[in-house]
Image (cartoon, rainbow, N blue to C red):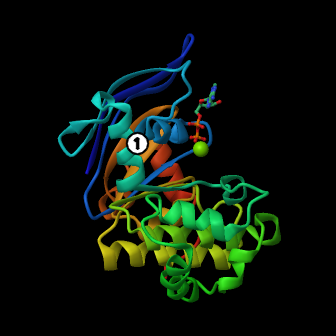
Amino acid sequence: MLEIKELSIGLDEQHIVKHASFLIKHGKISTMIGESGSGKSLTLLAILGMLPKEMRVSGDILFGVRSLFGMSVEELHSFRRDEVFVILQDAFNSFNPSVRLGKQLFALSEGKRTIGYSTFLERMSPIFSRLHLSNDVCEKYPFELSGGMLQRCMIACALYKKPSLLIADEPTSGLDLYSQKAFIKTVVEMNREMGTTIFLITHDIDVVKELADEVIVMFQGAVVESGKSDILLNSPKHSYTKQLVNSSFRMVE
Ligand SMILES: Nc1ncnc2c1ncn2[C@@H]1O[C@H](COP(=O)(O)OP(=O)(O)O)[C@@H](O)[C@H]1O
Ligand SMILES: [Mg+2]
């Protein structure tokens, strides 16, 4: 689905991401794991064409056979609007604090606005129930909900929108264990039921163990190994991956 080829990102004299190559395979759950500051979020911004202007970028990112770097502004906009849904770590900052959630969820889910708000609510209602949210959240402002509930609002939009690719950057950081589990369960269901391709960025090896088909290990700006999760986790090659695997104590159910 996406092929990242020799992606490098730099700023002034700094080489932040170095020749990163990896695949996000169609219909699979790919996870990128790496310590804080290893360049995961910048790699994601490169995929979205949203890197800060002052950063240098080289290499290529292919969506199918087309290079994202060769796309016009309109094409890139349509890729982001129609194909991808992105969930960021901090759900609170993903919303406008002074606008009621209903209006924001409508905009996030129905970018093209070919239907009215009441039809949107009718269609969203069963998705809310599935995520244990009530329709009342639409009347609320972001600060009136917990981080876990806001993250569930985001995933509600993703379920509504049915993107071909769902990207989530550290979506479970800062959430309580219940919300973490619920998030992971929903993502797996999206993948199994709708065939959504998932790209999930995390620093939590237990999240990787629970849901990954494919793993990409990022260390100091470089992809040090990648491949099928069962093989990679059972016989890690790079010392950083070995350390990660050994540091995990939680049993996988
Ligand atoms: N806007 C920015 N300007 C300058 N440096 C940045 C910027 N964003 C990130 N960096 C630097 O790039 C490196 C990688 O950042 P990031 O991709 O956010 O890491 P990760 O998501 O893996 O924690 C870090 O050292 C960070 O300080
Ligand atoms: Mg990050």
Q: Which residue is mark 1?
A: 77
| Residue sitting nearer the eye, 124 or 152 | 124
> Where residue 168 sits: x, y (%)?
51, 57
Mark 1 lies on a secondary structure that is helix
Q: Where is ligand 2, by quadrant?
A: top right
Question: Which residue sits furthest right?
Answer: 144
**At 49% across and 31% down in the image, what residue appears?**
221
| Residue sitting nearer the eye, 88 or 229 | 88
Indicate the quadrant where residue 189 lies: bottom left
Residue type at mark 1 is: His
48 above or below 51?
below
> Where residue 107 sits: x, y (%)?
55, 61
Taking the image as drawn, is residue 123 in sight? yes
252 above or below 203?
below
**At 26% across and 55% down in the image, what residue appears?**
25
Tell me: 232 left or right of 44: left
| Residue sitting nearer the eye, 121 or 92 | 121
**At 57% across and 79% down in the image, what residue appears?**
182
Taking the image as drawn, is residue 237 in sight? no
Question: Which residue sits furthest left?
Answer: 65
> Where residue 138 sits: x, y (%)?
68, 75
> Where residue 227 sits: x, y (%)?
30, 52
